[in-house]
Amino acid sequence: MVPKNLIKLEGKNASGMLRLSEALEEHDDVQNVYSNFDIDEKELEALAAQ
């Protein structure tokens, strides 16, 4: 699955989306998780350091 439109996320929205995505991936009943968000690499590094 490749999205046609990407949504740029920053700050609290990026952090929240990453937490939600991780929670969905870890859930036993979920087989696949697809998304259309885009987070800048610098933002990802900053969130990973927290």
Image (cartoon, grey):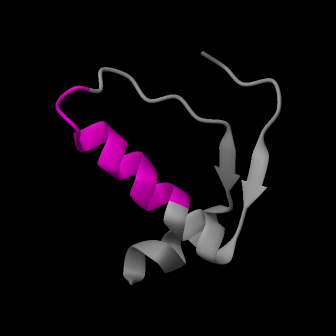
In-front residue for pair 26/4: 26
Q: Residue at x 61, y 75 (%)?
A: 12
Count of numbered tags: 0
- Give the farthest residue toward the right: 5
Q: Is residue 25 magenta?
A: yes
Is residue 42 visible in the rendered structure shown here?
no
Is residue 32 toward the left or the right of residue 5 in the image? left
Q: Which residues are magenta?
A: 17-29
Q: Residue at x 39, y 84 (%)?
A: 50
Is residue 49 visible in the rendered structure shown here?
yes
Q: Main secondary structure of the magenta part?
A: helix
Does residue 38 sit above or below 13 in this rendering?
A: above
Q: Residue at x 29, y 26 (%)?
A: 30
Does residue 26 sit above or below 9 in this rendering?
A: above
Image coords of residue 40 (percent x, y): 68, 62
Is residue 45 toward the left or the right of residue 43 in the image? left
Q: Is residue 27 magenta?
A: yes
Of the 4 image quadrants, the one containing the N terminus is top right
- Give the farthest residue toward the bottom: 50
Does residue 26 sit above or below 28 in this rendering?
A: below
Is residue 7 toward the left or the right of residue 36 in the image? right
Does residue 14 sit above or below 37 in this rendering?
A: below
Image coords of residue 17 (percent x, y): 53, 57
- Give the farthest residue toward the top: 1
Image coords of residue 34 (percent x, y): 52, 28
Image coords of residue 24 (percent x, y): 34, 41
- Give the farthest residue toward the left: 28
